[in-house]
Amino acid sequence: MRQQLILWSILLISLTQTAVGCMAIDHYRNFPLGTSTHGLVVFETYMLRDDIGDTWTGVTNLAIYGSTFKLLKSISLDSIQVRDTTFELKSKYIEALNKSFSKALVIAQGMSGFIAATPIYLSICEYQQTCGIVSLKADTLLSKFYLLYQPTRARLDLTFLNDTTSKHYEYLAGKGSVYETTFNRLAKELSINSIRKYKIGTKTLLVTHIGESVQMPYTDYNEMIGRKRKEYIPKLNFSEINQSIFYEPELLHHTKGVDLFVWVD
């Protein structure tokens, strides 16, 4: 536990004190494992890539969430560091997370009433607010974020992002750092990158990666990357739970974001 706390402290200090780095990326990611009698079981990661771009450092956990997505239990799994100066960093990142994911899956499979999740959909929206099956919206009067789910036109509340005391909101808003921002600014800057759906029993879970990937001095994504953003379906095998780990694509560098999940039916 002490080792975990020290690592978290180092990561947070790096996030709040480091100026915008050329190759820096950090994000919270959630990979659903399934459900048990206690709730939704999720493999969670927080990973940070350094300014040079050759090292990923982070921690993994297994978490259980209740029906209202309140965290019921969190089990620390691994401290991870992956370094490579060639072109193998992404594959080594995936390999390291897969090992920890497998450990989490074994634990989950031993839980009472466990039902495994089945991945059924994955697309990459390249940090846009309006995507094929879902759009990110903000109610600036109530200071609330929500998703508009196109298949049913349902308005889905983003529990984690609408709690201003949650780690997800404080992280994206840069609370306590020189980059601290406001809700209205977040409403303009936040957008959707990856979109996933999982079938668990008769229910469907939607997971969206929400964050920002604009590097100063740019304020426009298309200008920054030199082309128009376009949503696409990646050429990945995304149909088995033990093959559901993937690398979150970045448009440029200094990307940060969080995976947020919500039931859609």
Image (cartoon, rainbow, N blue to C red):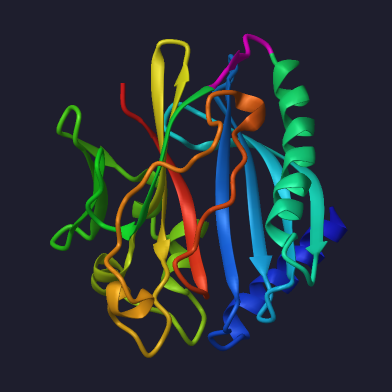
Please identify the quadrant where the C terminus is shown.
Answer: top left
Taking 53 as reference, is 21 above or below it? below
Number of numbered tags placed on the structure image: 0
Q: In the displayed structure, would residue 102 be above or below residue 175?
A: above
Q: Residue at x 29, y 59 (%)?
A: 128
Q: In this view, does 42 lie to the left or right of 84?
A: left
User: Which residue is rendered at x = 66% and y = 59% of the image?
Assistant: 47
Q: Can residue 166 be seen in this view?
A: no
Which of 10/127 is in front?
A: 127
Q: Position of residue 13 (x, y in %)?
A: 67, 78
Locate residue 14, reporting x and y percent: 66, 78
Instruction: Locate residue 134: give its quadrant.
Output: top left
Asked whether residue 80 appears in the rendered view, the answer is yes
Looking at the picture, tell me which residue is in the foreground, 126 or 75.
Answer: 126
Q: Is residue 203 above or below residue 21?
A: above
Asked if the magenta segment contains residue 59, the reply would be: no
The reply, left or right, for residue 72 in relation to residue 120 is: right
Task: Tell me the magenta residue range.
Answer: 112-117
x 80%, y 56%: residue: 80
Reply yes or no: does residue 113 show up in magenta: yes
| Residue 136 image position (x, y, % from top left) | 25, 52
Instruction: Give the quadrant of residue 116.
Output: top right
Residue at x 59%, y 23% (from the top left corner) = 240
Residue sitting nearer the eye, 238 or 201: 238
Instruction: Please provide percent x and percent y for residue 57.
Output: 75, 64
